[in-house]
Image (cartoon, grey):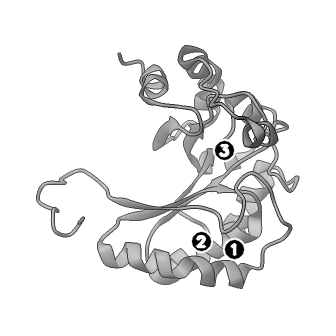
Amino acid sequence: MAGERSDELVGWEVGGMLGPRGDGYATAGPVDLDVAADYHRPQLESFRAAGASRATVLTLTEVGEAIGVARAAADVGIPAAIGFTVETDGRLPDGTSLASAIEQVDAVAPPAYFLVNCAHPSHVLRGLDEGPWRDRVGGLRCNASTMSHAELDAAEELDGGDPVALAADQQPLLDAFGDLEVLGGCCGTDARHVAAMWGVS
C-alpha cells in the first residue's frame, strides 16, 4: 500500500506493528536472542517488502527479545522502535530497570528509538532513573488505568480512567523524555484520551 499510494502520502510514514512472542503482561524468563530474531524476522521482511518505513514492537517484557527484534530489523534493513512495558514499580516484568534495558539493547543492536507502553504514567515515573538513556525514548503510549497488569488481566470490565487526569499525570514524563516522536494511548484509551494529551477538543 505504501508504494502504491506514495504520491498521496507525502509527509506520511507507514509503519508495521509487532507484539511480543509471548504474554505481554508477564515474562516467562530469559529469551534467546537468536530465537527471537528468527521468530520476528519474517514479519519484518514482509513490512520491508510492503514499503513500510519503520517497524515498531510493543509491550516487550525483557531484554533478550528486544535485542532479537533489533538485530533482525537491522539484518532486514528496516528502522525499528523497541517498546518496553513496566510494572507498577517502574521496572520491566523481569525486574530490569528501564535504564538498564535500554542500555543493554543499545550496546548490541541500537534501534531507531525506544518507547514505553502499556503502563500508567505513575508506574513509569517510579522507575525514572536519571541518565542519558532518557534521550533514547522517542515514544510514549500509556494506559488509562492505574491497575497492575495482573489486575487488568483479571478485570471483567474495561477501565477507561479519566482522560484529563491521564494527560496531567503524563506531563512529568513529557518533561523527562524531551524528544518524543510518538505520543498516544494504550489499554483503556480512546479518542478522548488522545485529544486530552494533545490539548485538542
Give the Cα distance between marks 2 and 1.
9 Å
Query: Which SS class for mark 2?
Result: helix
Badge 1: how crowded within 10 Å, few (<14), some, or many (20+)? few
Q: Name which residue type carries label 2.
A: Ala
Tally of numbered tags: 3
Q: Where does label 3 land, which residue? A: 134
Q: Name which residue type carries label 3.
A: Arg
In the rendered image of this protein, does residue 79 appear above or below residue 167?
A: below
Look at the numbered discs 2 and 1 and tell me whether their residues touch, using CB distance below 8 Å.
yes
Q: Which mark is residue 70?
A: 2
Q: Where does label 1 land, which residue? A: 108
Residue at left offset 51%, top offset 83%: 75
Q: Position of residue 60 (x, y in %)?
A: 68, 58
Q: Choose top left, top right, bottom left or bottom right for residue 33.
A: bottom right
- Residue 130 in sight: no
> Observer-nearest residue: 12 or 87?
87
Query: Which SS class for mark 3?
Result: helix
Residue at left offset 75%, top offset 57%: 61
Q: Position of residue 94 (x, y in %)?
A: 86, 56
Give the Cα distance between marks 3 and 2.
18 Å
Q: Name which residue type carries label 1.
A: Val
Look at the numbered discs 3 and 2 and tell me whether their residues touch, using CB distance below 8 Å.
no
